[in-house]
Amino acid sequence: MKKQLLSTVALAAILMLSACSETTTANSPKNEKNTTVKYVQNAEIQAKGMKQIKGLIGDVKPALMGALKSDKTGIGGMEMCSTSAQEMGKKYNASLPEGSKIRRTALKYRNPNNKPDATDVLVMTKLKADNSFDKLLVVDMGDNYRVYKALPTHKPCLVCHGETKSMSSSMLETIKAKYPNDLAVDFKEDDFRGVIVSTINK
Ligand code: HEC
């Protein structure tokens, strides 16, 4: 039983990094009017994007594991996600080559800083329709590339993104206080939750 709980926590931590990466510099208004997306096959860019995504995960994971372990209600994880993890995301981005950055976005988002731009919406609509979480999509944006990695909703994500009717009142209050316009609830296991996007300069 204890073992199972621990592995659930470990899974949550591994997957949640996604929940905890950089958020603030999300949108690039010049893409706002895009109506098509130029997908490209580029193994080199894809590998670079994956490396950045994994690098961030390596930074955030230990801290998040700690937060989840010490507070099983998930409230500690919430704090972690909305403050220290963002700082870590910023630091990580600062360590990347100029023009490179990582962010997360979603169709139904929690933090307004994570609001998707037009390209993000088109890519996510496709990923959601394909219902495929494995492949990475590379998009040629003209000045740079974007590598999109889809994030499925795993069981541990439901603590903070699941059905509101099954959430604790303290969790609901915490969410409401920090994110009054939250859209990121009522997901079910295996639903498409959002993406991590790695931007790489040409
Ligand atoms: C402990 C609570 C918690 C758990 C568990 C959690 N998240 Fe989140 N998630 C948050 C918070 C808080 C934010 C908003 C962070 C911010 O302010 O940038 C967020 C944001 C996100 C975002 C960015 C887009 C948005 O909605 O703002 C994605 C994508 C995301 N979470 C995916 C996941 C996935 C996938 C899982 C499970 C693997 C997960 N989350 C588990 C709390 C959580």
Image: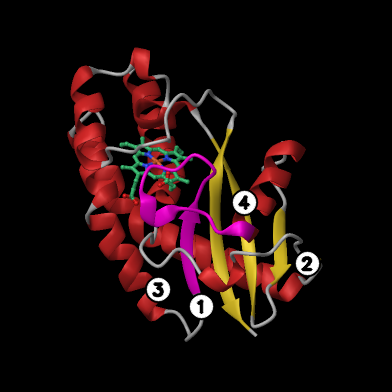
Residue on which disc 4 sits: 121
171 relative to 57, above or below: above
CB contact under 8 Å: marks 2 and 3 = no
* Amino acid type at mark 3: Asn
Q: Nearer the viewer, residue 89 or 26?
A: 26
* Amino acid type at mark 1: Ser
Q: Which of the two discs, 2 and 3, labels the residue nearer the N terminus?
A: 2
Q: CA distance from mark 3 to mark 4?
A: 23 Å
- How packed mark 1 is, by other alpha carbons closer than 10 Å (few <14, some 14-19, many 20 or more), is some
Query: Is-magenta flag for residue 97?
Result: no
Residue on which disc 2 sits: 38
Residue on which disc 3 sits: 93
Secondary structure state at the residue bearing disc 3 = helix
The image quadrant in which ligand 1 is located: top left
Query: Is-magenta flag for residue 110?
Result: yes
* Amino acid type at mark 2: Lys
Q: CA distance from mark 4 to mark 2?
A: 14 Å
Secondary structure state at the residue bearing disc 4 = helix
Q: CA distance from mark 2 to mark 3?
A: 25 Å
Q: CA distance from mark 1 to mark 2?
A: 19 Å
Residue 157 falls in image quadrant: top left
Q: Which of the two discs, 1 and 2, labels the residue nearer the N terminus?
A: 2
